[in-house]
Amino acid sequence: MTVHLIKLCVGVETVQDLADWQEKRLKSLVRAGKSAELCHRTRQTPKRRDEVLDGGSLYWVIKGFVLVRQRVVDLRPDRKDDGTACCGIVLDRELVTTRPHPRRAFQGWRYLDAADAAADTRGAAAVEGDIPPGMREELRELRLIDC
């Protein structure tokens, strides 16, 4: 049975900020002659590896809301820049926006059951462009919209 991961996206204000940061990271890896893959390093290795790799995604919490997810491609042993052992969460490049779902702050990552995961908003992309991002955030905070 599929299980997902959920994590705070610290230092990011919008989904576009995350996309820009990841694109910049990929370009710097290519310039350095390394494999161009998105690998998020984390201290703890998920024990439910098989369930995560069975179609699981990493759901990103941005400014208190789950707004986007990325499919988890692999979980593998890795090393941080200082040589400390860690887990590399290899992510698909595609960012899939989700219906905003409020989430309180927490440390590290958590498991997220498939039944509790935010639904994708693939059909709402056209509506997204109709409202400026700042106004969208204010309306969402006032609970006047949920997307």
Image (cartoon, rainbow, N blue to C red):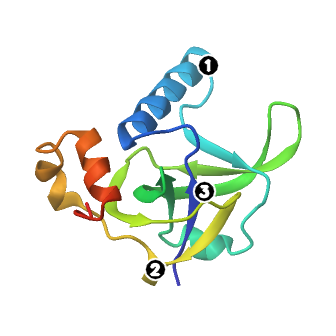
**Is disc 1 placed on a helix, strand or loop?**
loop
- Percent across and percent down for residue 94 are 38, 47
Of callouts 2 and 3, the N-terminal one: 3
Residue that appears at 86% across and 46% down: 85
Examine the rendered structure and indicate whether residue 144 appears above or below residue 8: below
Mark sitting on residue 33: 1
- Percent across and percent down for residue 29 are 58, 24
Residue that appears at 11% across and 44% down: 130
Q: Are marks 3 and 1 in contact (CB under 8 Å)?
A: no
Say few, some or many: other residues with alpha carbon within 10 Å of mark 3 (under 14 / 14 to 19 / 20 or more). some
Of callouts 2 and 1, the N-terminal one: 1
Tell me which amino acid carries mark 1: Gly
Pointer 3 residue: 74
Q: How many marks?
A: 3
Tell me which amino acid carries mark 3: Asp
- Percent across and percent down for residue 18 are 45, 38
| Quadrant the C terminus occupies | bottom left
**Is disc 2 placed on a helix, strand or loop?**
helix
- In the image, 46 versus 106, the foreground residue is 106
Query: Image quadrant of residue 82?
Result: top right
Tell me which amino acid carries mark 2: Asp
Examine the rendered structure and indicate whether residue 106 appears above or below residue 22: below
Residue that appears at 61% across and 59% down: 105
Cα separation, mark 3 vs mark 1, equals 21 Å
Q: Are marks 2 and 1 in contact (CB under 8 Å)?
A: no
Task: Give the left or right position of residue 15, taking residue 55 as reference.
Answer: left
Residue that appears at 15% across and 42% down: 129
- Percent across and percent down for residue 113 are 53, 80
Cα separation, mark 2 vs mark 1, equals 39 Å
Pointer 2 residue: 116
